[in-house]
Image: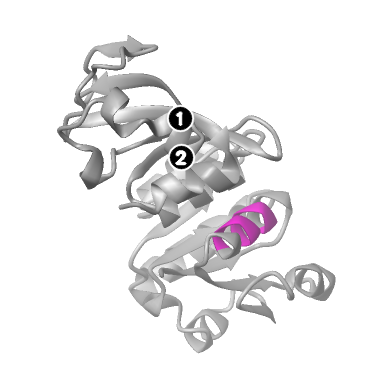
Amino acid sequence: MKSFLIIGLGRFGTAVARELSLLGQEVLALDEDADNVQRIADDVTQAIVGDARDEAVLRSVGARNFDCCVVAVATDMEASVLITAILKDLGAKHVVAKAQSPVHARVLERIGADRVVLPESEMGQRLAQRLSRTNVVDFIGVSDDFSIVELHPPKAWVGHSLGELNIRAKFLINVLAIRHGAGGHVDVTPAVDQIIQADDMLIVIGTNENVNKVVELN
C-alpha cells in the first residue's frame, strides 16, 4: 500500500483520490472548500479542510511523509505554483502537479515538480492506476466496466506461450497485442504459440475486475 496526499478536490483531484482509494491505497484529501471535503469524506482514508498555500497546514498533515503528493489545483496558477514549491521545500518525496496550460507546466517543472500532467478526460483515473501499480504502464477506460491496460507480464507467465497459459479461459481477458522490449516490435493479435518474454509488454482488454486480478498477480 502506498500513501497519497491529494490537494484540490475539483473533478480531477476527486477522480484521482477516489480511484486510488478503490485500488486500496491510503489517501488523504485536502481542500479549502468544506463542501468538497464533505463529498469525498466517505470515499478516502481521511479528508481535511485546509488551505494548502499555508506551509503550516502542509506540515501538520505530514506532507513529506507521503509516497506521493498530487497538486490538483490548476485554475489558480499562483496557488498551484506556491503549493508545489512549498511541498518541495518540505522534502516531499514525489510531487505530481496538474497544469492548466503548457506555460503553466513549464513553470511547475522549473520549480521542481517531479511530474506535470495536462489532464484530458479520464486522466485522473489513468494517473491513479499508473501511480498505484508499478507494473501498469498505461490505462484507458473504455467504459465504466471495461478497460485496456498495458502491463508487464506476471512473472509466472514468462517463458510460457499464450496457448499454454490459456489466458482468455482462465482470466477472462484478451491479449490484444504484445510489445517486445521498450519501443520494440508490436505483435497485433499474437499467435497462441507466442512465448512471453520478461521484457515484453502485454496490452490486454477485459472487465475492470478481471484486469485488476491479472495486475495483482505480480
Residue 30, relative to residue 181: is it above or below? below
- Give the labeled residue for mark 1: 168
Q: Residues within 10 Å of mark 2 (few under 14, many from 20)?
A: some
Q: Residue at x 75, y 73 (%)?
A: 37
Residue 208 visible in the snapshot: yes
Q: What residue type is labelled 1?
A: Arg
Where's residue 185, x and y in %? 24, 12
- Give the labeled residue for mark 2: 171
Where's residue 73, x and y in %? 63, 56
Residue 180, relative to residue 208: is it above or below? above
Where's residue 69, x and y in %? 47, 64
Residue at the limit of the structure toward the right, as seen here: 35
Q: Do the residues labelled 2 and 1 touch (CB within 8 Å)?
A: yes
Q: What residue type is labelled 2?
A: Phe
Q: Which residue is drawn at 27% across and 29% down?
A: 164
Q: Is the magenta stretch mostly helix, strand or loop?
A: helix
Examine the structure image and report whether residue 19 is included in the region drawn in magenta.
Answer: yes
Which stretch appears magenta?
Answer: 14-20
Residue 163, relative to residue 11: is it above or below? above
Q: Which residue is drawn at 71% across and 40% down?
A: 144
Residue 115, relative to residue 193: is it above or below? below
| Between 112 and 98, the one nearer to me in the picture | 98
Where's residue 194, x and y in %? 23, 18
In the rendered structure, the answer to whether residue 128 lies left or right of residue 145 reads left
In terms of secondary structure, where does tag 1 sit?
helix
